[in-house]
Image (cartoon, rainbow, N blue to C red):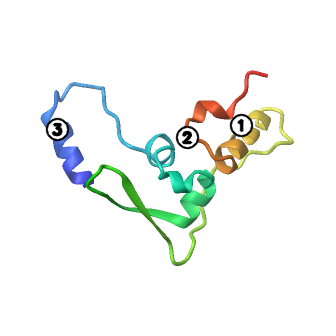
Amino acid sequence: EDHSKLQELGKNDPNSTDIFEESLIDTYYPQRPEEMEEVCLYDFVKDYAKCRDNNSGQRKYRRFVKPCLPNHRLFDPNKENQREDYFYSMLLLFVPFRNEGTLLAEN
């Protein structure tokens, strides 16, 4: 699948910088099936793998037999210059979302 995407990109304008690759945070997690609505990003990475797209274009996921341990950057909330990144990463990992922009409130 990834190879065919690379071939398709190669057919496009070779000088183009307009390239988008599907990613976990931008594509797979926000577009998870409705029955996984309450699954946070951390559990999604820990427990599920994409297995295929069905005929309707919907992705299917399977549970790992043995959960994996997600690797993520660690921030120190006691350091002033890392505090905001720490709290944002906690929201991103442990609060279910469909649109990353909804994680932050105006107030």
Query: Which residue corresponds to mark 1?
Result: 85
- Labels 2, 3: front one: 2
Seen in the picture, residue 43 relative to 10 is either above or below; the reply is below
**Extreme residue toward the top, this view:** 106
SS assignment at label 3? helix
Amino acid at pointer 2: Arg
- Which quadrant holds the C terminus? top right
| Percent position of residue 48, x then y | 50, 64
Q: How many marks?
A: 3
Q: Which residue is mark 2?
A: 98
What residue is shown at x 73% (from left), y 27% (from top)?
A: 105
Which one is earlier in the sequence, the residue at label 2 or at label 1?
Answer: 1
What residue sits 21% from the left and 25% below the top? Answer: 15
Q: Residue furthest right?
A: 78
Q: In this rendered view, identify the residue nearer to me: 35 or 22.
A: 35
Q: CA distance from mark 2 to mark 1?
A: 20 Å
